[in-house]
Image (spheres, rainbow, N blue to C red):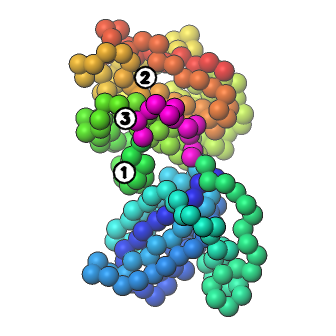
Amino acid sequence: MVDVEFRVVSERRDGLLLALGQVVIANGFTLLRQRMLNSDEGVVLVMVVRGPADQLLVLEEKLGTHHLVQSFEASPYEGGSAPPPPVRANGAGNGNGHASAPPPPAPSAPPLAPTPATAAPIDVQRVETLLPQLARNYPNILLQLVALERELPPAQREATLRYIGQRVGAWVYKRDFALGGQLPLADSVRRIALPAMRQLVQAELQDDVLRVRNSPFCHRGEHGECCHFLRGMLGGLLEGQHGGTVRVVESQCRNTGAETCRFEFEA
């Protein structure tokens, strides 16, 4: 579960909380608190929500493209005090806009495993702002990601791009593949990872190894494997079938002189 704060700017106040609250609840999230105020930008609505990490990108896309929303920002919520009881979208409750029962305790957790203490921190707010844009533009997202890679400090590139890839992969799995049955790892790679990759790059499967011929992340003049977004996305795609038990390894990369970028999967 994750706690996220959304900041929405709209021209309209009446019905704004009701409309967006219904979107939040319809996507499996709980509205923990909200505030609304007038500003020079227009009506500003701030909502703190809690829900499943793998559904967050879908929710961000729906809020960011809602017809009442002029601008939209998302950031992790790190409030120091416990949030109030959840707000119901229909306004029912104890008369002050809150539901009568408090939410069950659920600690906030990032959608990925924590990065090592020695790793450079990810600019999470920047990533959360980017993800709805990627959802709107998908699959035409590689130019945005290459531009982001060039702007990031070298120490942040791998962790940030893998994080984004994981989130995008989980979203694509949820959108396109979640209704299928449980598959063995080799079938998951062939029937889920391969077709999803082919929306972005030239990919083929040989002996359970996925090969990419035209990764845009290669030849940056740096050493080592560099297709961090693709590796993260493959992990996100397979996590829906196998949880966190699959390890994706880029065993060869065009950046190091190989003919193709080679991804292997270990259960």
For the point 34% across and 41% down, the residue is 141
Label 3 or label 1, whichever comes before in sequence order: 1
Q: Secondary structure at mark 1?
A: helix
Tell me the tag on residue 156: 3
Residue 135 coordinates in the image, percent (x, y) = 42, 50
Type of amino acid under label 1: Arg
Residue 102 coordinates in the image, percent (x, y) = 73, 72
For the point 31% across and 15% down, the residue is 223
Q: Is residue 52 visible?
A: no
Label 2 or label 3, whichever comes before in sequence order: 3
In the image: residue 96, left or right of residue 40: right
- Nearer to me, 114 or 47: 114
Residue matched to label 1: 126
Q: Do residues under tags 2 and 3 come within 8 Å of each other at their CB atoms?
A: no
Q: Which residues are magenta?
A: 110-121
Q: Secondary structure at mark 3?
A: helix
Front disc: 2 or 3: 3
For the point 62% across and 35% down, the residue is 239
Front disc: 1 or 2: 1
Q: CA distance from mark 1 to mark 2?
A: 29 Å
Q: Is 113 a magenta residue?
A: yes
Q: CA distance from mark 3 to mark 1?
A: 13 Å
Residue 65 coordinates in the image, percent (x, y) = 41, 64
Q: CA distance from mark 2 to mark 3?
A: 27 Å
Front disc: 3 or 1: 3
Tell me the tag on residue 203: 2
In the image: residue 90, left or right of residue 156: right
Query: What kind of secondary structure does the magenta stretch mostly adopt?
Result: loop
Circle 3 packing at 10 Å, graded few (<14), some (14-19), many (20+), is some
Q: Is 62 a magenta residue?
A: no
Label 1 or label 2, whichever comes before in sequence order: 1
